[in-house]
Amino acid sequence: MKLSEIKELLQCEVLAGEDDLSVDIQQVVASDGMSEILAFAKSRELMITGLTNIQSIRTADVAGVSAVIYCRGKRPDKKVIDFAKQKQIPVLVTPMVMFDICGILFNRGLKGVS
Amino acid sequence: MTAMELLRECYEIQGKNFDKAGEVSGEIKVVLRDLGIDAAHLRRLVIVAFEAEMNVVMYAQRGTMTLIVTEEDINLETTDEGPGIPDIELALQEGYSTASDEMREMGFGFGMGLPNMKKNSDEFRIESNVGKGTSVFSKIRLPAHE
C-alpha cells in the first residue's frame, strides 16, 4: 500500500517528506519503545509511535524504516522535523490512537514484523 | 597474522545529555558507509552502537566508543564511567530493566538494549565493575569471513 493511501486512511497531516508519499509499505512496526523497533524492524517498514523526541527519528534512521507516523495527534518539535527532513524520512501525524491505527492497517492487509 | 586495520576512531559520549544522544552512532553510520560496508552489516553495527550509546547517556557520567574496522571484521568497544552492572546474566535477559521513568519517557529502558546488542553481534562480551563502570565489546564479522 502506498504511503499516500495510508495518509488518507489515517487522516494524517504530513510534517516532512510531502514529496515522498509514493513509497510502498508492506509491513508495520508499532511501539513507543525504541529498542522494540530496533529489535523487530528489518528495514522499509512503516513505523508508528507515540514518542516524538529526537530519538524517534534516530531510531527510524538506524532501523531503516520508510516513514514515521506519530499517533494520538502528538507533534514533534521543529528540530525533530528538521532532522527527519535531513535524513529524508517522511513524517506524518494522525489524531488516531495506536490501537485503531493498527486495526485499520491490519484490515487492509498490512502485517506486523515478528 | 592479524587482519589489516582499515580504520580506528574514538568518540566521546556525554552522560545524561539526551539531546545529543545518538549523535556518535550517526557519525559511525556515515563513517562505515563511506568505507563501503554493506547495508546489512552496517545496520547491525549501528544498532549495537546506538543501544550502547543510549546506555552510556542514560546511566553513566561519560563514556568512550572505539570503532576498529579491519579487513575481516568491525569491532566496537564502549567503555563508561557509570554505576556498573551487578548481575550481567540478569541484565542480558529480555525484559529485565533498571531504567527510571525518565529513561522510559525517552523511549528506552524496556529491557531490550543489551539483548539487541548481543543479537546483532557475532561476538559479544560485557565486563563490569560495580561503582566504576562497564565495558561492552562487540564484533561483527564481514562477508567472506563469516
Image: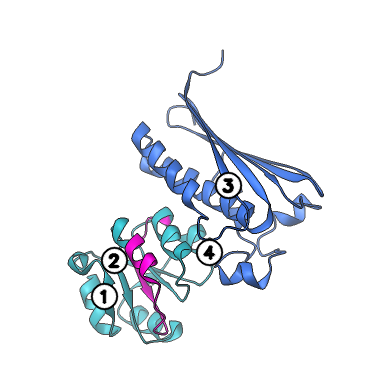
Chain colours: A cyan, B blue
Calculate the distance from the C-alpha at mark 3 to the C-alpha at mark 1. Answer: 33 Å
Q: Residue at x 46, y 32 (%)?
A: B142
Same-subunit check for callouts 3 and 1: no
Residue B43 magenta-highlighted: no
Q: Are marks 4 and 3 in contact (CB under 8 Å)?
A: no
Tell me, yes or no, if residue A5 can be seen here: yes
Calculate the distance from the C-alpha at mark 2 to the C-alpha at mark 3. Answer: 29 Å
Indicate the amino acid at tag 2.
Answer: Pro
Q: Secondary structure at mark 3?
A: strand
**Badge number at residue A14:** 1
Calculate the distance from the C-alpha at mark 2 to the C-alpha at mark 4. Answer: 20 Å
- Give the residue at mark 2: A90
Looking at the image, is A21 positioned above or below residue B121?
below
The subunit carrying tag 4 is A
Q: Taking B115 as reference, is B9 left or right?
A: left
Q: Are marks 2 and 1 in contact (CB under 8 Å)?
A: yes
Indicate the amino acid at tag 4.
Answer: Glu
The subunit carrying tag 1 is A
Q: Taking A60 as reference, is A92 left or right?
A: left
Same-subunit check for callouts 2 and 4: yes
Looking at the image, is B56 positioned above or below residue B137?
below
Residue A100: image x %, image y %? Answer: 41, 86
Provide the residue span drawn in magenta: A63-83
Q: Secondary structure at mark 4?
A: helix
